[in-house]
Amino acid sequence: MQKKAICPKYPFRSMIEYDLFGNPQSLSMREVLQKTILATRKDTPVAILGEFSTGKSWLAHKIHHLSKFTNDIYYELDCIKMHPDQIRNELLGRMQHNHDGGHITHNAFNYVNHGTLFVKSFNALSTELQHHLVHLVEHFTTTTIFNARQDPVNVRVIVSVDYKAYEGKKSDIQALLEQINPIYISQPPLRKRREDIPMLVNSFLEELSQRYNRQQIPHVHPSVLYSFLLYDWPGNLRQLQNTLEYALIISNEAEIKSEHLPPVFKNQAGSHYSRSLVYNEDSFLRAEKMLCQKVLNKNGSLRKTALELGINYSTLKKIIK
């Protein structure tokens, strides 16, 4: 029976295509683009580092899609959502009886041979399984706990590591990963790529409008976009998606305004929402200037632009000088 790729369902296709293969404005995503292209041209293992919900799974799937393994199986092991016993069986092997009364042993490497194995949240694995996975990748064999025979396999392995856990156990996980000499790709959090927020917003809204059968994609008021640039996005891409979905659900208007946003955006003194906290960040300054210049080009008036963005006239003059 022919194997079929087991791929997670990512509803926001246009968003990830923009991120990696469009024209990202942020320097951090341009670096990701370069390393992603390098990864697609090699069989080397890949380690994707990043915070929660920065798009590590999307990136892993995209690497598979653009590599020589694209027509073969893509298999994801989610080390947080899957039961520990199931993960153990996938990596150490499980015994199955065949029709002749004998038995055969399988692990994920048997199943994914000539394809891509994505181990999501490698840091969530037990130390035993982390070492076993690294051993399998090092030797490209399918040794299981039931069968010591080492059958060669050809599997592209991609692992993701959450930054908080990586920092907490940095020496152990880093030392393990260095044994397989992976290509490291650091997926930046949204607050480090604020220049990309307007395009991400457009991509999310396009897909959400289709999901909710909206005949017209809503326009986002400039003041809302400016508030998005100010916000620190602790929940990264998932929070941006949820924020726009919230606005789309509670409003049937053609334009998303500040009153359509979740409560956190209505408290400008909040810990994640203040220009005083981000005014010296390069990513914010570039994003702020790009947005202000775009709105100014449309309006042709500094005062009207400042009013639309919800900022002081004097502040706007300093931004665009």
Image (spheres, rainbow, N blue to C red):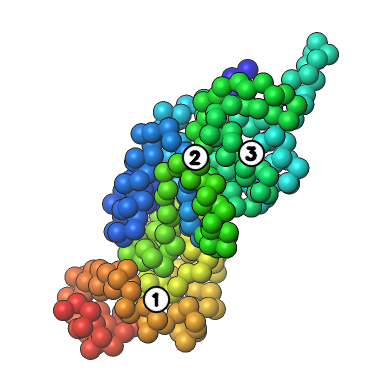
Quarter of the image with the N terminus is: top right
Q: Report crowding for label 2: few under 14, some 14 to 19, many 20 or more residues within 10 A (C-alpha).
A: some
Q: Position of residue 51 (x, y in %)?
A: 51, 60
Q: Which residue is mark 1?
A: 230
* Amino acid of disc 1: Leu
Q: Which residue is mark 2?
A: 180
**In the image, residue 35 above or below residue 198:** above
Q: Sequence order check: which comes first, mark 3 or mark 2?
A: 3
* Amino acid of disc 2: Ile
Q: Position of residue 139 (x, y in %)?
A: 55, 30
Residue at 41% over, 72% down: 228
Q: CA distance from mark 1 to mark 2?
A: 40 Å
| Furthest-top residue in this view | 100
Front: mark 1 or 2: 2
Quarter of the image with the C terminus is: bottom left
Q: Position of residue 70 (x, y in %)?
A: 45, 30
Residue situated in front as seen by the camera: 156 or 221: 156
**In the image, residue 281 above or below residue 205:** below
Q: Report crowding for label 1: few under 14, some 14 to 19, many 20 or more residues within 10 A (C-alpha).
A: many
Residue situated in front as seen by the camera: 146 or 274: 146
Q: Would you say residue 170 is visible in this rendering? A: yes
Residue at 55% over, 52% down: 173
Looking at the image, residue 296 sits to the left or right of residue 126; the answer is left
Q: Sequence order check: which comes first, mark 1 or mark 2?
A: 2
Residue at 70% over, 34% down: 92
Q: Residue 132: give its label.
A: 3
Residue at 35% over, 46% down: 35
Q: CA distance from mark 3 to mark 1?
A: 44 Å
* Amino acid of disc 3: His
